[in-house]
Image (spheres, rainbow, N blue to C red):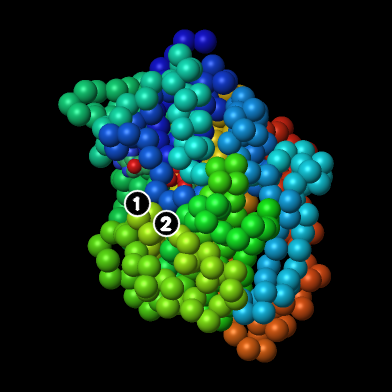
Amino acid sequence: MAHNPILIAGGGIGGVTTALALALRQIPVILFEQATEFTDVGAGIQLSPNCSRVLCALGLTQELAEQGFLPQYALFRHWRSGKIISESSLGKSAEEIFGAPYYHIHRSDLLNMLVGAAKAQPLIQLKLNSRIESSEETDAGVRVVVNGETFIGRGLIGADGIHSKVRENLFGKQSPTFTGNVAWRALVPTNSLPKNLIQPAATAWWGPGKHFVHYYVQGGAMVNCVCVVESKTWQEESWSIKGHFADLAAEFANWHPTITTLLKNLDETKLYKWGLFDRPPMNQWSIGKTTLLGDACHPTLPFMAQGAAMAIEDAAVIASCLHQQQDVAAAFLQYEKLRKERTAMIQQLSRRNARVFHLKGIAAWARNRAAKRAGGSTMKKLYGYDALSAVKKAKTGENK
Ligand SMILES: Cc1cc2nc3c(=O)[nH]c(=O)nc-3n(C[C@H](O)[C@H](O)[C@H](O)COP(=O)(O)OP(=O)(O)OC[C@H]3O[C@@H](n4cnc5c(N)ncnc54)[C@H](O)[C@@H]3O)c2cc1C
């Protein structure tokens, strides 16, 4: 089927996955990325079954299995004693229950995999060094001018991240809010650590005013660490800057020896600090033939490891909607309707976790007791969602 392409602003995980999902439905795409190469800031990412299901359907099953790490379980632990607060199975059992695997992966491995698949797709044109500043809706679709060249598409998808220019053009400038949390991101070579110090698990250590997450990436060669610390201000101009080891070590000085050992062995040249910013759920995502996707419309705090997962789910749903109907504006409205409730729920639960993970004293004790009983239903809600059949299931009221 030959017709004008869909234009995508942004070549992050959300934009490139969307390009692939559309091409698989025989819809041509031009994707514009402002950077001179495809890169992702930060180290690891957790891919839960709700998004690995989509990636597998895009033909990436084999590459995910080769480059991802399959954690056996998820653990929450006490920051000082190391006591296990709650444990749930991942590994084979997650795949059996949810129909898709749970992986940990290095972000650049994931992005390279997606970009490699996109480059092999004749229906996808990837344009680097191409920043979209503005767009104009016409009878034929949407027109953008990039580096002096004009492109016309049937529609425009803004997958251009939390600072989205497409969002600003649609709905005006609204600055995101600093959440009072700073995330440090680091990698530790596994061969620098005592054997078996780190279990094959997604582990989160809860402490007063901070928490520490670690898991294996690069087939187990590296341990990815995300260390979140409360902070009243974030004064740096950039949201992501090099961090100083001494500052991070001081934050976790009196924590369990596993944490202090991890910190002693981290690769200081790859230590980054990242101010965590937030926006409330949006009432409206689309105007006419332009819509938003991923962090551009629902930036999600990392406390459920679901931000990229939501962008990947969006990609599958928007591709189904555009496949089903020729009218782009109607397809975008259908997509928005199908995705708004779920992404808002995840945004809000992630925000809540920002408080819950950092509780102190008696409140922390009560949380730990409750955590033992919770888990199963949240996992079902998160990981059981099937974005591939969301359009079909919406008719019968399933998949909520
Ligand atoms: C510490 C931390 C840990 C996280 N861990 C997880 C996790 O384990 N699992 C998970 O699912 N999520 C996680 N997330 C969230 C996840 O990283 C994001 O939700 C996800 O990367 C968003 O992808 P995106 O493609 O929507 O946006 P982005 O990754 O921000 O990509 C946007 C792209 O658009 C480009 N761009 C911007 N403006 C323009 C323009 N005007 N024209 C052209 N190009 C443009 C940018 O250069 C960029 O490449 C984490 C986040 C943080 C901060």
Q: Residue furthest bottom?
A: 362
Q: Nearer the viewer, mark 1 or mark 2?
A: 2
- In this view, the residue farthest toward the top is 2
Image position of 375 with respect to 145: above or below: below
User: Residue 224, relative to residue 212: is it above or below?
Assistant: above
Q: Nearer the viewer, residue 234 or 205?
A: 205
Residue shown at 28% from the left, 70% from the top: 235
- Within 8 Å: ligand 1 and the Cβ of disc 1? yes
Q: Give the residue number, with chain letter if any, for mark 1.
A: 163
Amino acid, disc 2: Asp
Are the residues tagged 1 and 2 within 8 Å (C-beta)? no
Report the front residue among 369 and 24: 369
List x then y, in percent, for residue 390.
Answer: 68, 37
Residue 8 in view in this figure: yes
Question: Going 82% across and 41% down the picture, which residue do you hit?
Answer: 96
Q: In the rendered structure, which amino acid carries the disc numbered 1? A: His
Residue for badge 2? 267
Q: Residue at x 77, y 78 (%)?
A: 369
Question: Number of marks in the image?
Answer: 2
Q: Residues within 10 Å of mark 2 (few under 14, many from 20)?
A: few
Compared with residue 231, is residue 299 higher up or lower down, i.e. above or below?
Answer: above
Rendered residue at 57%/63% (across/down): 213
Q: Quadrant of residue 211?
A: bottom right
Residue 288 appearing in the image = no
Q: Secondary structure at mark 1?
A: loop
How far across and down, in percent of the image, does residue 64 sit?
A: 61, 34
Q: Is residue 143 above or below residue 93?
A: above
Return the disc, 1 or 2, that comes first in the chain's sequence: 1
* Residue closest to the eye, 188 or 327: 188
Seen in the image, is 142 located left or right of residue 25?
left
